[in-house]
Amino acid sequence: MRGDSCRRLAARYGLSYTAVHRHAKAHLPPALVELTRERAGAGVASAQAQLAALVLRVEALLAGAERDGSKTQAIAAASELRRCFELQAKITGELDERNVQAVNVLVAPEWLLIRAAITEALLPYPEARLAVSGRLRALESAQS
């Protein structure tokens, strides 16, 4: 929400006005909505617009440094440009740096209980117990 009206956003993305309005009311913190309105009213550019302007300036610096043969300045400008692109990717959601933790469910206490319960329930049915146990072992070995 860059200060665009719900009607304009609805038209741009092919949505209904009520859907956009409901989304804004339900998912945007009131403080963010107010800040966006204040910034739009004051003519303050969004972070993305400011970043785009910065990228243009840094690209011009990089081009000048390359033209002048200044390797040190070119490297510094390229480094800053990389940081700009990284920030842009974070803002747009292309770069997700959330810590993702893998969980091995094969050693989880809950799975071990379920596995024991299945094996126990199949005790009266030796063929079925062997078939299920063999299939579970095959799945578990494929995962590790």
Image (cartoon, rainbow, N blue to C red):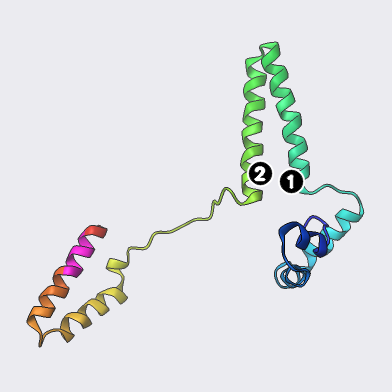
Judge left or right: residue 97 versus residue 44: left
Give the number of callouts. Answer: 2
Give the structural element (helix, strand or loop) at label 1: helix
In percent of width and height, residue 137 lies at: 17, 66
Q: Nearer the viewer, residue 21 or 29?
A: 21
In this view, the residue farthest toward the bottom is 124
**Amino acid type, residue under disc 2 in the picture:** Gln
In this view, the residue farthest toward the right is 42
Query: Is the stretch drawn in magenta largely helix, strand or loop?
Result: helix
**Does residue 56 belong to the magenta stretch?**
no
Judge left or right: residue 135 versus residue 80: left
Quadrant for the C terminus in the image? bottom left
Q: Say which label, 1 or 2, has the lower sequence index.
A: 1
* Labelled disc at residue 63: none
**Are the two marked residues, 1 and 2, in contact with CB atoms closer than 8 angstroms?**
yes
**Does residue 138 belong to the magenta stretch?**
yes
Residue at 61% x, 41% y is 86
Residue at 81% x, 59% y is 8
Residue at 20% x, 60% y is 141
In percent of width and height, residue 100 lies at: 46, 57
Q: Which residues are magenta?
A: 135-141
> On the image, numbered disc 1 is attached to which residue?
48
* Within-10-Å neighbours for mark 2: few <14, some 14–19, many 20+: some
> On the image, numbered disc 2 is attached to which residue?
88
Marks 1 and 2 sit apart, C-alpha to C-alpha, by 7 Å
Judge left or right: residue 71 versus residue 112: right
Give the structural element (helix, strand or loop) at label 2: helix
Residue at 18% x, 63% y is 138
Quadrant for the N terminus in the image? bottom right
**Amino acid type, residue under disc 1 in the picture:** Gln
